[in-house]
């Protein structure tokens, strides 16, 4: 029995017993009350008649004195019946109404609803702790990729508005403190369907606690944490947290990629983007003088990357302590540090904004960042601007500044976590791609654009095993050779290719970038593909359906049951008559 | 002493005793079976059932089940009685009476199991 039914029943005991007593006393009284029938004979109601009378009186329907006109004794009891039963009904109804409004009951209802929503999730789900900007962005992109998510959030208002959000999947949400293990268990931490937990609350300490709790209570699931402070980061790694995502480090790495190889950066942007959105344009960063306003975690991360590329940098920050530390390091010898805020024209001019090529406005205050951008643009309209965007509700303002790169921590984290979850191979691919020369990235980019069109492709991993590619495994066991190119044939029309590109092949821990069509597939291989959603479905079909695979491999559509084989032979005889005509038609 | 337990046990045992009172006597003799007693059995059984609502333990579920069985049996008996007397308009016949009594006999067994379960539960309780 669920908690809700049990709560209702427990609360309804008193009203129902009141009703039973009211009815039974009234019925008994009506049976006992002396009456007289039309002929003047003494008469008593039997239980059936009394139950009938009490039923229509108690519900205030009131058919009248049936079957015979009442005597005064019966009328006296009828009066008592009216007050007794009608009051009993009022009491019971009042009790039901108050039960529905009872906070404990509502809480129980909500929990019931939540657990039923989780039960209805067909496959695995990912538990997201914290439904702030990052949690929201993450939920949005994961549900778009057809991955179920469950949300736990401290703020009841955010959970209340959850059903109003326009996510493609139902996202069950529960109000609770994610640092409390009880609440995490309620949210489904120990549910067998829970595949991963993502801690993206605003506080590093809470995230750490979530990671510890999950590793202790359900060691099987993978844990991904957001962290902005280094000590917490190393602490999280120390007990086996799979991934710790630091938005500033992540962005600095992406920025470095953009400096070194714009085409590689573009490839990264396409493959990690939200599928079916428009492909982004390449970003070219000119060598020359750069200015960094705000030397916090963000500014320092980017500074290190610029330093590695031997770019001359001027740092602007109001902290003298930071300047002393900056000047003490010998590696910073060529670069300047100016005390100031950066949103006044004077400081920017001193920093050399007029002949700088780029400016990074990286303070943790959006108003300051916007002001810096506006002032700098006035002084030098050609500046390449990197803006740090802290609060989600300032989105329109940052879009209006036309900054070349806008860094939003929550989006950076969401993007990184999504690529971690959607395909671990993708991360390996991007890491390997980093070591390739720019021409390789250029070729890959043009292949993706030429083969898949103008929108961000879907990414999927094919594992050659019984679960994911049943038919393929069966055919491989027979000793037949299937090549990568075969997988790209359309199972509907084998002469055509599906819109997919193999990005990487993983075999025995060895990675091979951009495998060619001739490579024969072995059992246990993992292949990373990008392509359209339709291509994914087609590939899935041919991998799991023996007939489709046969059709692709042998150019024959063969049924496997005896009767159908006979039917097929018969059909083929008919087909042969039609074939010349069809072929002629195709040749035209 | 727990007042709730007293009320609970009272109604369960009363349901059994009243049921037995109605059941006792020659099976097909209407004079041996009082309609008021049947009414009382139905009412007391109803109350006993409602008192068992909302108990989430295994024992609670068993008790509720036995009570529901008794109710089904007693309702059937009452409906047979009302049908014959009020709808067909006959006087009570020995045939009908024996049907009613055998139905109430089923309810008696269910009520008996209820009380046995109650005794088991009480005796396993440690103080």
Image: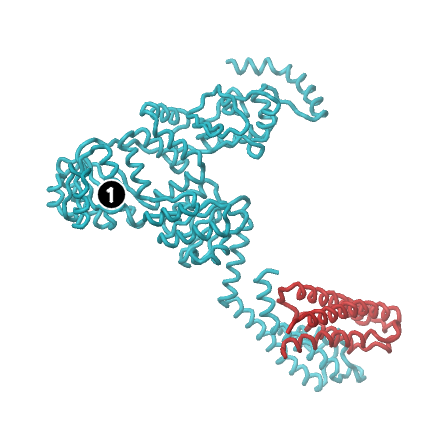
Chain colours: A cyan, B red
Q: Is residue A226 left or right of residue B46?
A: left
Residue A191: give x, y in percent of width and height: 53, 50
Residue B46: give x, y in percent of width and height: 70, 71
Q: Quadrant of the N terminus of chain A?
A: bottom right
Q: Is residue A242 left or right of residue A323?
A: right
Q: Residues within 10 Å of mark 1 (few under 14, many from 20)?
A: some
Compare residues A296 and B87 and report the one nearer the observer.
A296
Residue that extends furthest to the bottom in the rendered view of this protein: A72
Compare residues A368 and A315 and report the one nearer the observer.
A315
Q: Is residue A179 above or below residue A104?
A: above
The residue positioned 84% from the left and 75% from the top of the image is B24
The residue positioned 12% from the left and 37% from the top of the image is A354
Task: Mark yes or no: residue A61 visible.
Answer: no
Residue under pointer 1: A300
- Dividing the picture into quarters, in which one does residue A303 lie? top left
Residue B108: give x, y in percent of width and height: 79, 70
Task: Mark yes or no: residue A383 visible.
Answer: yes
Q: Chain of mark 1?
A: A
The residue positioned 49% from the left and 28% from the top of the image is A508
- Dividing the picture into quarters, in which one does residue B51 lie? bottom right
Label 1: element kind: helix
Residue B112: give x, y in percent of width and height: 77, 70
Q: Is residue B117 above or below residue A187?
A: below
The residue positioned 66% from the left and 18% from the top of the image is A572
Compare residues A216 and A269 and report the one nearer the observer.
A216
Instruction: Count the numbered circles shown.
Output: 1
Q: Is residue B93 left or right of residue A338?
A: right
- Dividing the picture into quarters, in which one does residue A300 lie? top left
Q: Is residue A126 above or below residue A494?
A: below
């Amino acid at each position: 029995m669920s908690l809700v039914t049990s709560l209702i029943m427990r609360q309804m005991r008193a009203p129902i017993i009141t009703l039973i007593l009211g009815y039974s006393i009234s019925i008994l009284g009506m049976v006992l009350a002396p009456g007289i029938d039309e002929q003047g004979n003494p008469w008593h109601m039997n239980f059936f008649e009394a139950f009938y009378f009490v039923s229509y009186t108690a519900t205030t329907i009131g058919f009248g004195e049936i079957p015979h006109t009442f005597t005064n004794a019966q009328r006296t009891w009828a009066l008592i019946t009216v007050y007794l039963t009608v009051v009993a009904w009022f009491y019971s109804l009042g009790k039901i109404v108050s039960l529905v409004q009872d906070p404990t009951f509502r809480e129980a209802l909500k929990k019931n609803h939540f657990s039923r929503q989780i039960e209805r999730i067909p496959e695995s789900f990912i538990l997201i702790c914290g439904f702030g900007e990052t949690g929201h962005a993450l939920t949005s992109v994961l549900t778009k990729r057809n991955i179920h998510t469950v949300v736990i959030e401290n703020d009841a208002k955010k959970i209340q508005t959850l059903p109003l959000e326009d996510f493609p999947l139902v996202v069950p949400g529960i109000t609770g403190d994610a640092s409390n293990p009880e609440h995490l268990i309620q949210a489904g931490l120990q549910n067998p369907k829970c595949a991963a937990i993502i801690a993206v609350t605003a506080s590093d300490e809470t995230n750490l606690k979530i990671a510890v709790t999950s590793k202790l209570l359900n060691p099987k699931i993978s844990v991904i944490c957001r962290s902005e402070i280094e000590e917490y980061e190393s602490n999280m790694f120390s007990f086996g947290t799979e991934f710790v995502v630091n938005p500033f480090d992540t962005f600095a790495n992406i920025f470095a990629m953009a400096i070194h190889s714009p085409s590689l950066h573009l490839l990264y942007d396409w493959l990690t983007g939200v599928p079916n959105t428009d492909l982004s344009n390449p970003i070219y960063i000119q060598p020359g003088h750069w200015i960094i306003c705000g030397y916090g975690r963000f500014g320092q991360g980017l500074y290190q990357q610029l330093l590695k590329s031997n770019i001359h940098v001027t740092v602007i920050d109001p902290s003298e302590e930071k300047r002393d530390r900056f000047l003490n390091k010998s590696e910073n010898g060529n670069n300047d540090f100016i005390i100031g805020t950066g949103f006044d024209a004077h400081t920017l001019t001193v920093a050399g904004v007029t002949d700088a090529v780029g400016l990074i406005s990286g303070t943790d205050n959006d108003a300051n960042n916007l002001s810096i951008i506006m002032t700098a643009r006035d002084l030098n309209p050609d500046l390449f601007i990197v803006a740090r965007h802290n609060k989600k509700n300032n989105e329109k303002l940052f879009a209006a500044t036309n900054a070349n790169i806008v860094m939003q921590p929550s989006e950076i984290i969401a993007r990184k976590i999504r690529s971690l979850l959607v395909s671990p191979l993708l991360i390996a691919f991007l890491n390997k791609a980093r070591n390739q020369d720019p021409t390789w990235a250029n070729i890959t980019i043009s292949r993706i654009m030429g083969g898949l069109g103008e929108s961000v492709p879907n990414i999927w991993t094919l594992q050659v095993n019984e679960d994911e590619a049943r038919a393929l495994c069966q055919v491989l066991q027979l000793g037949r050779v299937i090549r990568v190119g075969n997988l790209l044939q359309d199972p509907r029309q084998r002469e055509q290719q599906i819109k997919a590109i193999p990005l990487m092949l993983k075999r025995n821990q060895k990675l091979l970038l951009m495998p060619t069509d001739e490579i024969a597939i072995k059992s246990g291989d993992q292949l990373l593909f990008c392509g359209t959603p339709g291509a994914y479905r087609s590939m899935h079909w041919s991998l799991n359906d023996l007939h489709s695979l046969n059709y692709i491999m042998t150019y024959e559509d063969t049924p496997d049951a005896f009767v159908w084989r006979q039917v097929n032979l018969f059909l083929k005889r008919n087909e042969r008559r039609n074939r010349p005509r069809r072929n002629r038609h195709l040749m035209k | 002493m727990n007042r709730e337990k007293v009320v609970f046990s009272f109604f369960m045992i009363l349901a059994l005793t009243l049921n037995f009172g109605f059941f006792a006597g020659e099976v097909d003799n209407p004079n041996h079976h009082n309609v008021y007693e049947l009414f009382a059995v139905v009412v007391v059984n109803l109350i006993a059932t409602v008192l068992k609502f909302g108990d989430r333990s295994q024992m609670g579920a068993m008790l509720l089940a036995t009570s529901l069985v008794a109710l089904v049996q007693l309702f059937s008996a009452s409906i047979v009685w009302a049908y014959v007397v009020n709808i067909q308009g006959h006087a009570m016949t020995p045939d009908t009476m024996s049907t009613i009594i055998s139905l109430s006999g089923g309810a008696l067994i269910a009520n008996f199991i209820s009380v046995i379960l109650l005794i088991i539960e009480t005796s396993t309780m440690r103080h």
